[in-house]
Amino acid sequence: MRGQVLGVDRDGREGRIAGDDGQRYWFQPDDWSDRIGPSVGAQVDFETSNGRALRIYHVPGTAALRPANDDRHPRPRKDKIAAILFAFFLGTLGIHRFYLGRAGSGIVMLLLTCTVVGLLVTGVWALIDAIRYLVMDNEEFHHRYG
């Protein structure tokens, strides 16, 4: 059966799915068969037994509205202007990448900066990042980077 995740209680022990048949089904974390887990608004495929949703999978190609546990661990919003300034002025060191939570590429940029050729590469890379952030609309920026 197909349905949509309505919500998960605050302690994460139980949630509800609205089935396409108009019924509501409850589930527990152990009922999820994929590693993504529940998120409000997610389209799911599941089996039922006595009002319970079992073997729940996300429907491929669909996106959830927000993760179910977002209110417990909210991510701070990243400032677009700060990211642009970091990329432009400190970009060769990868500071803007660390700021946006991309530590892996930040470390690569930092290590590349230690060489002359790498300094040229990271300079161009940082300038491209600054321009990308500048032309990216706010909604897309916050969707990608929080």
Image (cartoon, helix red, strand yellow):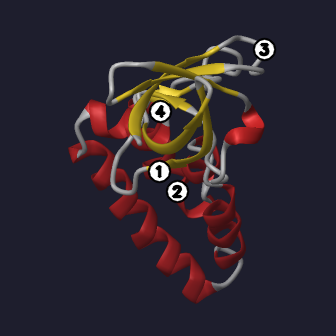
Q: Distance between the residues labelled 1 and 4?
A: 8 Å
Q: Viewer-proximal residue, 140 or 5?
A: 5
Element type where label 3 sits in the image: loop
- Say whether disc 1 or disc 4 marks the residue closer to the N-terminus: 4
Would you say the residues marked 2 and 1 are in contact, meaning their CB atoms lie under 8 Å apart?
A: yes
Q: Which numbered mark, 3 or 4, is in the foreground of this view?
A: 3
Expressed as whole percent of the image width and height from the top left, the position of residue 59 reads 41, 51
Question: Residue at point 47% right, 32% down?
Answer: 82
Mark before the other along the chain sequence, 3 or 1 = 3
**Residue that numbered label 3 is attached to:** 11
The reply to whether dot 2 and dot 3 touch (C-beta < 8 Å) is no
Q: Mark 4 points at which residue?
A: 82
**Is 117 or 47 nearer to us in this picture?**
47
Tag nearer the camera, 2 or 3: 3
What whole-number distance in Å separates the C-alpha atoms at marks 3 and 4? 35 Å
Q: Which amino acid does label 2 sit on?
A: Gly
**What residue is shown with label 1?**
87
Of the two numbered discs 2 and 4 on the same chain, state the one appearing first in sequence: 4
Question: Residue 91 — which label?
Answer: 2
Amino acid type at mark 4: Ala
Q: Looking at the picture, how far across and down is residue 132, in whole percent?
A: 30, 54
